[in-house]
Amino acid sequence: MNKSEKSRISALTMAALLTAARLFSLSLYMPHGGENAAITALTAAGLCLLKLPIMTAAALLGRHFGENRAFSAATAALSAVMVIICTNAFAEMTAETYPERCTRLTTFIVLLCICVYVASMGLAGTARTASLMLAGFALVCTPVLIEMRGSMLSDRLDPLSYKPVREITLTAAGLLRLFPEPVMLAGLIGRTDGSPSRAVKPFLIADALVSGSFFLMCGSVTGRFFGQSGYAFYTLAGNTHGAFIDRANGVFMFFSSSFAIITVSALMMTFWRSAEMIRQKRPREETAKAQ
Amino acid sequence: MPDYTAYKNILIADSLEKTLADIREITGGSMDINAPRLTINGTECAVVTAEGMVSGETVGELLLLPLMSLNGGLHSTPQSIMRFCTDESMMSSNKTVCYTYGSALGLLFSGFALVFVDGVPFAAAFGIQGYAVRSVSPPVSENELLASQEGFAEVVRTNISLIRRRIKHPALTFEMIQCGKLSSTDVCIAYVRGKADENAVAGIRQRLSEIQLDSVLTPGYIQPFLERDPGRRLFSEVGVTERPDLLCTELIRGRIGVIVDGAPFALIVPYLFAENFGTVDDYSVKRYYAFFVKIMRWLAFMLAAAFPGIYLAAVNHDPEMLPLKLLLNLAAGEKTTLLSLFTELVVIMLLLEILREASIRLPHAIGTAMSIAGGLIIGDTAVKSGIISSPLLIIVGVTATASFVLPSFSQQLSVLRLMFIFAGGFAGFFGISACAVMLSANICSQSLDGVPFSSPAAPFNPDGMSEMLGRKTFRRMEKDEPTTKDLK
């Protein structure tokens, strides 16, 4: 890791980093049996209201207690755990999607090595890569998804549920299974210029729009089979049919992997920064004690 | 090696004999030092020159003739003869006075003639360079259709004049410093005051003055000293050009030029990644065409770097991506070959690199024969014998052609292409993605003097995007006053 790297990013670039992490989580979303896509879409959009105080609190805590040793230790521990969880989730997905090509352990190790390199390039490099990848994702996937419009039928979306509370609770739990954004924000807000709200608001708006439209698209393609469709992102990819590309699995895999690398790298940097804070803090505290 | 630096600060002796003996000792009696002596009104004088560095005719006309004309005149003392040389005559427009051997020899080896007068403890130096130089000729590696056909030459002063001719404004400033402990190469820093960042100019000045190399023979010697963390970077934040008009465009945008004597190239600091996709011709064509061509160049970059890798990933890992007819055709082509697709691709890409490397350094006549041997005979035979498949030749052809669009990236593209092939071959689109993110992070983490290398795309600068993907209108350029500060 580049110790001398003290690059700072803008609040909007931080929002791009958080959005990349959200897209990573979405790409690994697997609906539970019998899940209703319309309710998932509504839950995903509605969750953003719940995320608002969480993200705001994470940003404020990071800003005010970023140099506090206990806070840094907590952030370091959480980010280390999130690194393992996110890497493992991605490795599990590749092992299931490409069982003949990838083993879980190999992907786990390779992804960690790649992320160490990307993280060593510094926060600015990773965050700017996130914004470029988001632009690329919008440019490449929009035409792919537009070409899918023939497979989408709005009749397949049915927002009715017999047990709405249970369904919403289960869906919300599934959606928050991978939620590394607060840890990233708390750990990296110290290197972000501008007001935290300038990072949080665009992120939550993008989250609501992307999550909502993603699940509506999935539901309009898979209908009642949404719950049995496995990884929703790849189900959607498997249903694409374009002029140049028949099934966009590879394209979706490209972006899913990119967002995975960016997310894990950002978490590694969060860990590194927190560890650095603990290290820097120690001499000062020892001096104070000595005095 | 004797300590020549010890002589640098020694004052020139009063006595002509001692001075000439000192010069002989310092230069080790080198045969290329000429020191013809003459006597003017009883005072011994010497004109010291380096063989081949000055024009013999000019020495005769501008130095010896006026000096000889003093015979029998009023200049009878050593001081008055030297005063004639330094103050009362105009033997050369480029003249100076040296008090130490260091400065005197520095000028002597730059093509100055030194006039020593017995009893005077300094020398008059006259710039009457007459060494053989290549004249200004069209640039070799940066051809343009609708722009100047002048390229930089090897002599730094000629290059300075090429820039000055294009920017006739007092704000254009040139600073000359010497680099290289043995070569003492003239390195010129060019910038436009008020446009260039003063701190960046000071930084470059300091970095250049701290270079401790024995010799600086090409801009490549000093480029790593101007870059930030060059060992970890794939691309350089320092641009290279052999076009004076391109350097002028960059100077006006607030960039700093560094010209090294002896090489027909100039360095541009800082240089953005996106600037590699621009040409001077973009300002001579219609705006819509400039936009179209720039998009093509971006596409060519992506094709040259990643197309073989993406093809490999699609065919080997995600064949469902390809339309059925194409897939069947590819499968039929692959059926007849002996090697796996991955091996075929690696072999043919290495062969392409060998052919490219061979074609760069060969004379033109042999180059054509080599193209026939390499391209036609090997390519045709390889397909017929079933070593490689025909579809692969199309991939290689497209990749090679795309890589010729951006010659400034030839080094990086060669390596990136192989990286993408290995990544796509072993891990499919996960590998391609890993390579793309690592490459992007490497580019986006670069910055020089506070200017991000990936600007204006990341950090996003809407004002700069029109330049990145096309060009601004001239109406807009009338209103703009770009500086490097806009990019920070």
Image: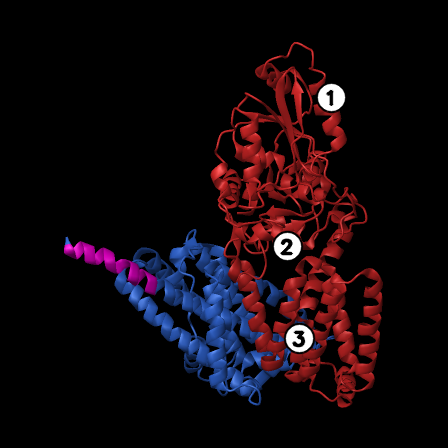
In the displayed orientation, state which residue is furthest to the left.
A291
Q: Amino acid at mark 1?
A: Leu
Identify the element where label 2 is drawn: helix
The answer to whether residue A291 shows anywhere in this view is yes
Disc 1/disc 2 C-alpha distance (Å): 57 Å
User: Where does the magenta region start and end?
Assistant: A275-290
Which numbered dot is residue B463? none
- B409 relative position to A68: left or right: right
- In the image, are marks 1 and 2 on the same chain? yes
Mark 2 crowd level (few <14, some 14–19, many ≥20, 10 Å Cα): some
Above or below, A216 relative to B206: below
Per the image, the residue denoted by label 3 is: B310
Looking at the picture, tell me which residue is in the foreground, A86 or A171. Answer: A86
Mark with earlier residue (1, 2): 1
* Magenta stretch contains residue B267: no
Q: Amino acid at mark 2?
A: Ala
> In this rendering, which labeled residue sits more in front, label 3 or label 1?
1
